[in-house]
Image (cartoon, rainbow, N blue to C red):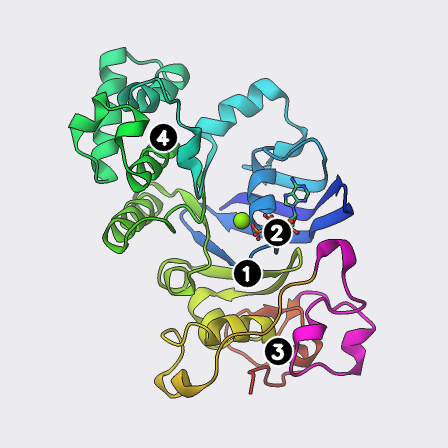
Amino acid sequence: MTLLEFRDLWVTYTGSRGRIPAVRGVDLSVGAGRIVGIAGESGCGKSTLAMAVLRLLPKSAEVSGEILLDGEDLLRMGWGRLRAVRWTGASIVFQGAMHSLNAVQRIGRQVAEPILVHERTTPAKAAARAEALLERVGLPSSRMRSYPHELSGGQRQRVMIAMALACDPELIIADEATTALDVMVQAQVLQLMTGLVKERGVGLVMISHDLSVLSAVCDTAVVMYAGRIVERGPAREVFADARHPYSAALGAAFPVIGDPASRGRPGGLAGDPPDPARLPEGCSFRPRCAVAVERCGEESPELLRVPGIGTVRSSACFVAQEGESVVFG
Ligand code: ADP
Ligand code: MG
């Protein structure tokens, strides 16, 4: 069952640099009980896509297309309905979200508050739920009485994660949510989130620069480049056996994902993604691409199914669409 669906989503910021098309025609769906990973370098539009879901973008952002949650378009929803959806329908945790905690309110009250507001329950029951949630993200119940400044950054981030889970949302978007946590705590939080997916059929969108996390945790992965999805497929395959030269380069920078023989291959990718205000002609990746052909400078490739593979793989690369290898060399 489809829980979340982006249909031809475009987001353009207008600022001192002019018009910045940060997301350009994204189509993506997330099923209930499924985990979709989003990879891509900084600046490729991942957070813009995430924020568009709950209309958290600044006024300077012009949005078009549709974002359907259970078939209801979030972009055209009234503010009252949206406010309810923000806790019980879908919730987002950002990297550095801990800065949005209220400095003068105790942790327990902050976690319990959305439960009290959105569910008919007593303060005592809401507090008990808050305490259980804190425990599930690895914080002792004594933290209920702490103020944010008494916690470390990692602990505050975990409070934000507990808050995002407080009202049992159907959809969770984790935007580098566990990146700043130490490895043990990160594993615990990932296990908590994947548990919710399995047990309660929550849909999870996980944005991370850590491809080993994405390939371990996600069912499907998409790779974004310059505001577009350039590859989509089963997570492990996308990073270990890429069908777009950009995903191949990202995967090569994480040799642990690929086969042992690939470890000697020079990974990494020179340069940076293009400035969205000044995109190159044709394929946005062409200036950094080792396998580009003439056509790549003239036309922008659509995301199309790659032939000749058992699983459903899509790539926005003319070379891959011809069935040619796109591995760097
Ligand atoms: P990512 O999360 O993949 O790093 P972002 O969605 O944060 O990417 O950014 C995508 C592009 O949009 C970048 O070029 C960034 O500079 C630009 N951008 C992000 N937020 C704003 C904003 N508020 N105003 C103008 N440009 C923005
Ligand atoms: Mg981001």
Which element type, helix, strand or loop, lies under badge 3? loop
Q: CA distance from mark 3 to mark 1?
A: 24 Å
Q: Which residue is mark 1?
A: 40
Tell me which numbered mark, 3 or 1, is placed earlier along the sequence.
1
Q: CA distance from mark 2 to mark 3?
A: 28 Å
Q: Which residue is drawn at the image coordinates 49% and 70% (left, top)? A: 238
Which element type, helix, strand or loop, lies under badge 1? loop
Are there few (<14), some (14-19), or many (20+) residues within 10 Å of tag 2? many
Q: Which residue is mark 4?
A: 163
Question: Does the numbered disc 2 mark a residue whose Cβ is under 8 Å from ligand 1?
Answer: yes
Q: Which residue is drawn at the image coordinates 63% and 85% (left, top)? A: 324
Please check the rendered image and state whether residue 150 is part of the magenta-colored stretch, yes or no.
no
Range shown magenta:
275-303
Tell me which numbered mark, 1 or 4, is placed earlier along the sequence.
1
User: Mark 3 or mark 1, which is nearer to you?
Assistant: 1
Q: Position of residue 76 (x, y in %)?
A: 68, 29
Are there few (<14), some (14-19), or many (20+) residues within 10 Å of tag 1? many
Tell me which numbered mark, 2 or 4, is placed earlier along the sequence.
2
- Answer with left or right where residue 20 lies relative to residue 4: right
